[in-house]
Image (cartoon, grey):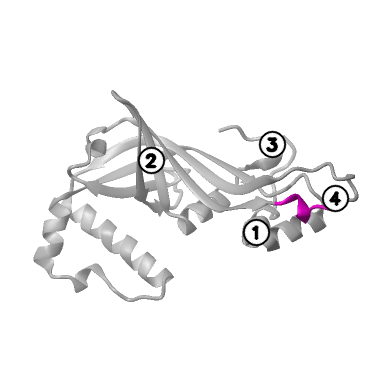
Amino acid sequence: MYVPAHFSEERIEVLHGLVERHPLGALVRLDGDGLAANHLPFELVPASAEAPYGILRAHVARANPLWQQDGAAVLALFQGPSAYVSPELYDLQAVEGRAVPTWNYAVVHAHGRLRTVDDAGWLLAHMRRMTRRQEEAHGHGWSVDAAPRDYVDKLVRATVGIEIAIERLQGKWKTSQNRSEAERTRIADASGMTACLHARLGPQPGPR
């Protein structure tokens, strides 16, 4: 991904935050027919000594050939807030009208290798965690255990887990960093990207 230095975001906690708030990722790989993509909700395991960038976990239908690509290099794409930016939000008089529209966005790219996990116990625990997190986030209280166990077991048998130890993590926060502070605030308010802008304005790495 092309990332100008002023749009680069390297803080793992900020990158992980976007993935956790927007867990539906596009998982891209290269197979015999060319590029292939699957859209999957992911569970993010925090960084550790064994996996300094964290681990992504998901599950797919057994009929999906993705799980048969064990060891394949993959790229998971996560998109956060995005918005069209009209020149009317700029201080047009200061630049004598020399302005054009643009698009602001925040994205995270996670690189790694696919590992297949064909284990019923692993899958059930993974599904319980993912469901609990999303139910709580949306103000609901349903749990996997609320469904009949034979029904759940049947679904688990029809599913295969995947895991990706993240080897490289790249973030791009395009939030009008080339505009004045007043313009950035106005743009963020108008586009609904205020929280994204505040994340970007936190402590930054030193000069590179």
Task: Report the residue marked by disc 3.
Answer: 5
Q: For mark 3, give the secondary structure.
A: helix
CB atoms of marks 1 and 3 within 8 Å: no
Q: CA distance from mark 1 to mark 2?
A: 27 Å
19 part of magenta stretch: no
Task: Report the residue marked by disc 2.
Answer: 27
Which residue range is magenta in the image? 86-91
Q: Residues within 10 Å of mark 1 (few under 14, many from 20)?
A: some
Q: CA distance from mark 4 to mark 1?
A: 18 Å
Q: Which amino acid lies under the numbered mark 3 shown in the image of this protein?
A: Ala
Q: Nearer the viewer, residue 122 or 132?
A: 132
Task: Report the residue marked by disc 4.
Answer: 92
Q: For mark 1, give the secondary structure.
A: helix
Q: Quadrant of the N terminus?
A: top right
Q: CA distance from mark 2 to mark 4?
A: 41 Å
Q: CA distance from mark 3 to mark 2?
A: 25 Å
Q: Which amino acid lies under the numbered mark 2 shown in the image of this protein?
A: Leu
Q: Residue at x 13, y 52 (%)?
A: 157
Task: Report the residue marked by disc 1.
Answer: 191
Residue 65, horizontal then vertical, whole percent: 22, 36
> Which callout, 3 or 4, points to the residue nearer the camera?
4
- In the picture, measured across the screen, residue 190 lies left or right of residue 70, that is right
Q: Quadrant of the C terminus?
A: top right
Q: Nearer the viewer, residue 122 or 96?
A: 96
Q: Which amino acid lies under the numbered mark 4 shown in the image of this protein?
A: Leu
Mark 1 or mark 2: which comes first in sequence? 2
Residue 103, horizontal then vertical, whole percent: 64, 46
